[in-house]
Image: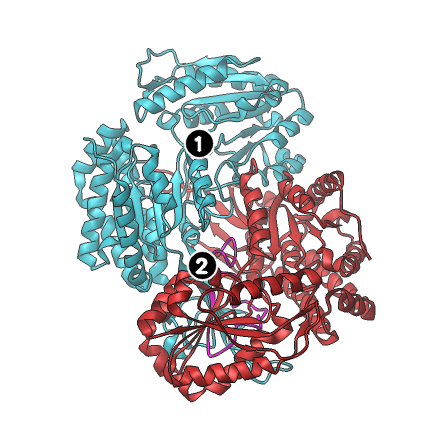
Chain colours: A cyan, B red
Amino acid sequence: MTFPDSTPDQVNTALNEAHIAFLSYKNLSGKQKAKFLRAIAYEIEALEQNLIQVAMRETNLPEARIINERGRTTGHCRMFADLVEEGSCVDARIDTAQPNRSPLPKPDLRKMSVPIGAIAVFGAANFPLAYSTAGGDTASALAAGCPVIVKAHPAHAETSELVAQAIKKAIEKTGMPTTVFQHLHGSNFEVGKALVNHPFTKGVGFTGSLAGGKALYDIAQQRAEPIPVFAEMSSINPVILLPKTLEQQAVKSAEMLAASITQGVGQFCTNPGLIIAIEGKGLTDFSQSLSAKISSTPAGIMLHQGIADNYLKRLTQSVSQKGISIEGQSTSAVEKNQGLPTVASVTAIEFLKNPLLSEEVFGPFSLIVKCKDFTELHTVVNHLHGQLTISIFGSEAEIALHSALLNIITEKAGRLIINGVPTGVEVCSSMNHGGPYPATTDSRFTAVGTDAIKRFVRPVSYQNFPASLLPEELKDGNPLRIWRLVNNEWSKS
Amino acid sequence: MTFPDSTPDQVNTALNEAHIAFLSYKNLSGKQKAKFLRAIAYEIEALEQNLIQVAMRETNLPEARIINERGRTTGHCRMFADLVEEGSCVDARIDTAQPNRSPLPKPDLRKMSVPIGAIAVFGAANFPLAYSTAGGDTASALAAGCPVIVKAHPAHAETSELVAQAIKKAIEKTGMPTTVFQHLHGSNFEVGKALVNHPFTKGVGFTGSLAGGKALYDIAQQRAEPIPVFAEMSSINPVILLPKTLEQQAVKSAEMLAASITQGVGQFCTNPGLIIAIEGKGLTDFSQSLSAKISSTPAGIMLHQGIADNYLKRLTQSVSQKGISIEGQSTSAVEKNQGLPTVASVTAIEFLKNPLLSEEVFGPFSLIVKCKDFTELHTVVNHLHGQLTISIFGSEAEIALHSALLNIITEKAGRLIINGVPTGVEVCSSMNHGGPYPATTDSRFTAVGTDAIKRFVRPVSYQNFPASLLPEELKDGNPLRIWRLVNNEWSKS
């Protein structure tokens, strides 16, 4: 099923309507927003097999994956419901007046976070549910008190329509402002551009390519009023294998990485696209074992033809660069819409010379960078762009010997992993799914976990407000029983 | 005394050195950074009369103001010292592993804030101490763990040199990395441009004009790796006078506002440059009283000739716009370097037609917008750009009648004030000194108060880290006794 692109008029109307919704929605209590978010989860579940079947058809993803992703989607709706119902996330601060302070009296000053306004969310190709219509961006923006306008990803527009209908049912059933959520279609860039350019759009959530994310970011920064863009774009999630440990666990490491590289046909932003190690017996054993695993992994159907075409193009380009050898490639017959698992290798010297090799190849591909020694390995690590994750495989003792490496990778990534693969993004308070550019456009915020709500709020101070005019969160006596910093002491009473 | 502009080579060397300092400075404990910040405060105080005299000579500010500003500067150094010594500001989160969770085990995941890297700070013309060399940007960046490169404001370069020497003494005495603070000069834009463009610059702090701040912002966004810019630029700090209350306290309101408009020759970013009220007896009385006060306020010497020239130019331009009447102007003789206190008025209709009237006139000027009724007043308020502050003068009962106004101004400003003037920025946890564009380039952060540190950090997650490799802040047993969110419960034990 295809849907006509939304017209410029429709985009304009949607934002004007979103702004009207905002002026009432932003004042709803945490309890009311929680009820809405839980209703969204319920209505998505009520779509039952219809949603599963449509999503499978549109994305080529297997049923188990879609069911899992649906669980994650309803899970984060309920997580944000719990968060705003509890309410401490407004980060309330109170400094009471000191009328007799000399030389000047101190006024009563209180502060809390408020929502920033209407948010444009772009559905992601690779997560038709969890990063799309009711994905983490939408759920966190609605939890923050912001209306949301979703542009459906054209590759799964029907799935997006179904979820949008579920959200609209939840709006009706919980009596939310009708236009607090709106759904648009756009297969060409103009719709997205108009969305980001509208004066009532106050923030943008995007998951996709570097080219797409950077284009939206540039538009947003060139507006009369620049707005924040949270684009999660490009990461090759380097994995550093320390040599002594590698000798002891070459096969085990290869198995873990082969599974991670090929999981979901490599279509995760956390796919390990770069492996950095020092030449020696450990690396030889590891490469052989990884190549064997990759060779025996069948090619899988990718999300849509455009992604498969792009993978083939980027893969061909990468492996034809100077100094690249293919170490292993799936031997299965490959259809036009499938992605062929492939591992290649290159020396550190060639890697450092060729910037193309630091770019993401979205699909089941990984590149092994073979270093002569630790000096070369350090140079390669220093050369890395910003990443969502960097992993180190090594024993506690061996990592401790190379603590300078830990010091450097902290500057390069949003999540550091020891002896684990980067795929698998836990949804919790301690998750940071973000990282220095070009992994994202703003390394100070996470797209996953409770803190994702912080992207869509800003602080406001209330000076000298009589009690009756203060928001509940800031009133004396703490009627909502939330954590607040009162005269520099945290308290819940 | 004049100082030669730093050369491109000097800028490049400074940033390379800053990056080297960063790799060790970022790992210092809160206690160590606190010692350093307190030493800065001590060394600034040790400059004694020399600093006071040089600053007075360079800025034309009176002794009492410089002494007060010095107190504020050493005060925020000590405030940030207390903050990082206590340590909870790293916002630590811990989610412990659940190895037996089904279908997938949950990894151990911990998160805290880390510094973003070297910060370029631009000294502000109007605060030679508190927003300059050891100002809030520098102190909060150093507290966060970021090296700082200050570009001295050319109008008070010698004051800046003195403070820089004090900071360098503090570096020596507390054994900090030598290049954790560096000081450059630049009277032309190229030095600032080179600073913002350097790959090792990871953030920018700026207080000044809209043109200057926006130019730096645009450079920062067009870099290969865009970086955050915290520019505090332009605010006219509207004051809304509600009619019933105004009738009862026209003279008192006029006295408060006259003092605020002319304080420090109007050279505060929180100067009340716009007064919005409804025509009637209250407004007539208020205007007469305000005009009388302004007429009898002598012209004061401005910070430097450039600011005085610019004030005269912008004042002349504003009062020559269609429909503008001068209500009151200081009758004192005026020297070339003085700013003449002036109040003008305009009808709402003319105000809404002319965008120039919404722009800041930096100096002792305010414009009264006369509205026919509440409908016009609402239109004017809706028309406002982003502001640092918006004030409402009105009784609790009268404000409650117009709660829709409160709802709108929350979207327009970073600090809302009831029955108070915007000048006077309290330094505390509840202060938000920031606001929607063009007041600042990022409404989600404050430039004043403890939360200013948040501008210079980003979160990092640590997955599966053995205890010995974790930062102290995230270790089991909470050795630093800081507030942490452990499995979704806040705890200090």
The dot on residue B355 is: 2
Residues in magenta, as a range? B414-442
Question: Mark 1 touching mark 2, by CB under 8 A?
Answer: no
For the point 32% across and 74% down, the residue is B374
The dot on residue B426 is: none
Q: Secondary structure at mark 1?
A: helix
Q: Position of residue A403 (x, y in %)?
A: 65, 38
Q: Is residue B417 magenta?
A: yes
Instruction: Name the outermost residue toward the bottom.
Output: B248
In what quadrant of the picture does the N terminus of chain B appear?
bottom right
Q: Chain of mark 1?
A: A
Task: Kindly report which numbered mark, 1 or 2, lies closer to the viewer in this rendering.
Answer: 2
Name the foreground residue: B105 vs B303.
B303
Describe residue B155's horizontal placement relative to residue A96 as left or right.
right
For the point 54% across and 48% down, the residue is B458
Name the foreground residue: A345 vs B8.
B8
- Residue A487 appears in the picture as rendered: yes
Q: Residues within 10 Å of mark 2 (few under 14, many from 20)?
A: few
- Badge 1 is on which residue? A211
Identify whether A489 is placed above or below B393. above
Q: Chain of mark 2?
A: B
What amino acid is found at the position of numbered circle 1 in the picture? Ala
Mark 1 vs mark 2, CA separation in Å: 36 Å
Identify whether B188 is placed above or below B41. above
Quadrant in which residue B410 is drawn: bottom left
